[in-house]
Amino acid sequence: MDVFAVPGDRHKGWYLSLMAPNTKGPEFAWLDPSRLYCNSQALADCAKDLLSPFQSDNIDLVAGIDAMGFILGASVATALGKGFLAVRKAGHLCVATQGQNYTDYTGKEKTMEVRLDVLRPGLRVLLVDQWIETGGTMKAAIQLVEKLGATVVGVAAVAIENTEGGRWIKENYKFSHCIPEELQSQIDGKYLDSFKTVNN
């Protein structure tokens, strides 16, 4: 699918065919969703789909996870008319922070941080990331938000894989993703049929 094409029928997840497969090897994620962000309608529809389950929820702030979660999270915050909080990798914030250790999808031990002067009791936060594979990164972000007394309204990502961590998130928090039920098995199998038509 051409990166700027917009179909007449914009059903949920139509933009998933814009995603490109990994061509760089096993140290990288198995696909690159960022191609869909280049299409303004795709990005807008993705944000709308992610917000659909939260229409009746009171959300004060959107928090996005470093780094690709910044793009999607900021889009969701703009659609909501709310502010955006960056959850950063350790060492990138020049103010006082709260940290949380975690293991990412590659198995590497890392630390993420959030500034101390925003989150507080009573604040209701929607957490956004690009993709949830093992769930370790999102779980750490949840722990950071809750450690500072704020409430996690829900979790939103383009996809949540049915891993142990992905299921934990689905069982314990309200969530949204953009994957139609018929594509979930492809997501879990780490290969989309639409990859056959992607021109790299």
Image (spheres, rainbow, N blue to C red):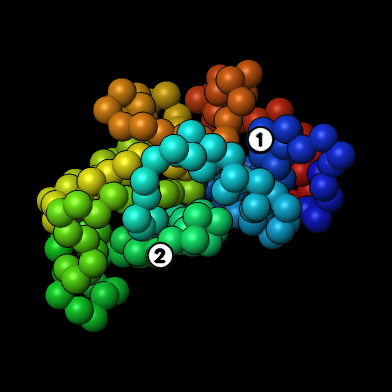
Q: Amino acid at mark 2?
A: Gly
Q: Is residue 166 visible?
A: yes
Look at the picture and state if 3 lies above or below 155.
below
Q: Residue at x 20, y 79 (%)?
A: 95
Residue at mark 2 to residue at mark 1: CA–CA distance: 25 Å
Q: Is residue 55 left or right of residue 178?
A: left
Q: Secondary structure at mark 1?
A: loop
Identified by mark 1, the residue type is Gly
Element marked by disc 2? strand
Q: Which residue corresponds to mark 1?
A: 13
Q: Is residue 25 left or right of residue 87?
A: right
Please, is residue 23 above or below residue 111 in the view?
above
The residue singled out by tag 2 in the image is 83
x then y, percent, for residue 131:
47, 43
Identify which residue, 46 or 92, lies in the foreground: 46
Which residue is more in the foreground, 10 or 193?
A: 10
Q: Kindly indicate the quadrant of the structure image that contains residue 171.
A: top left
Camera-near label (2 vs 1) is: 2
- Residue located 35% across and 64% down the image: 85
Q: Residues within 10 Å of mark 2 (few under 14, many from 20)?
A: some
Q: Earlier in the sequence, mark 2 or mark 1?
A: 1
Q: Position of residue 56 (x, y in %)?
A: 44, 37
Q: Is residue 193 left or right of residue 184?
A: right
In the image, 8 versus 65, the foreground residue is 8
Q: Quadrant of residue 89?
A: bottom left
Is residue 65 shown above or below 22?
below
Q: Position of residue 86 (x, y in %)?
A: 35, 64
